[in-house]
Image (cartoon, helix red, strand yellow):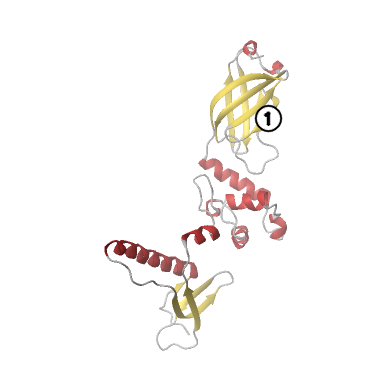
Amino acid sequence: MATSNNRTWNLETFLDSLIYELDKAQDTLSVKGMNRKLTYTVKDVSLDLQIFPEFDGETVRFVTAQPGEIGASKVTFLLGSIRDHQIQEVSRKPLTRGDISLEEINLPEPEKRELKKLGIRSAEDLRRTIEDQNVDIEKVTDKKVDYKGLANLINQSRRQQLAPTVSKASFSKSQGKTILTLEGENLAIAQSSEQFPAAAINSQVVEVISANAKELKIQVNDNYLQGEQSQLQIALDPYAIVTMNLQLPITKLKK
């Protein structure tokens, strides 16, 4: 049985440390090869560990056996060679600046655990799984994950990082209809929303024709434009509302 003064460790931390040491060794050999020709190569490395596994119902941790202790389990790590392009082919893409990891979302631990079991660790992973692969995440997790609630939490976290800005507003005519175009950054970024974005001019609802992160097009009823100034309100999502005054006279619209 493991002694009480021996610290437990988990597999992820152990592998992270091992990989870090291997990377350092590779960097050293790279520099050394500039000054002295290398006449050998390390093809395979085998590492045997005598350990006591501990399982708390969710997480497996290990205690390394001390000299003289019996009853330990043996775990063998065999490290083989792999090329950099092979790593790129099988590894997930790193998080980008605009992506959100599950750790940043105020998500209940049971749901977070279910998503991690499926290899989903970010909002982009979730989007690829649901939109590109057409996976019903609620059925796969036996309804342990509420996708609508999860999407709302993701959108809320994303809005905390990406505030909307409007840099330009212009009117135009298309097939006899007045179109208001807004240009900017981080406008419509909600992942799953049927009600947003929504817009109103002088408290009158107007139709949002198209919307993306950089542009919104809104169809305007000319009767809603009162004089030279009208108030536009846009709810981009539940966490971002834009209010602005439109000062372009209706008589100056392009025909």
Q: Is residue 156 above or below residue 8?
A: above
**Identity of the residue drawn at 67% across and 36% down:** 196
Left or right of residue 86: residue 252? right
The kind of secondary structure element at disc 1 is strand
Which quarter of the figure has residue 182? top right
Q: Is residue 123 above or below residue 37?
A: above
Task: Report x, y in % for residue 242.
Answer: 58, 30
Q: Residues within 10 Å of mark 1 (few under 14, many from 20)?
A: many
Q: Residue furthest top?
A: 251
Which quarter of the rendering shows the C terminus? top right
Q: Amino acid at mark 1?
A: Val
Name the residue that disc number 1 marks.
208
**Identity of the residue drawn at 59% across and 44% down:** 155
Task: Report x, y in % for residue 63.
Answer: 46, 77
Task: Report x, y in % for residue 87.
Answer: 50, 61
Which quarter of the figure has residue 223? top right
**Identity of the residue drawn at 58% across and 34% down:** 187
Closest to the observer: 37 or 217? 37
Which quarter of the figure has residue 115? bottom right
Task: Report x, y in % for residue 110.
Answer: 62, 60
Closest to the observer: 226 or 76? 76
Q: Is residue 226 above or below residue 92?
A: above
Closest to the observer: 12 or 21? 21
Left or right of residue 91: residue 175? right
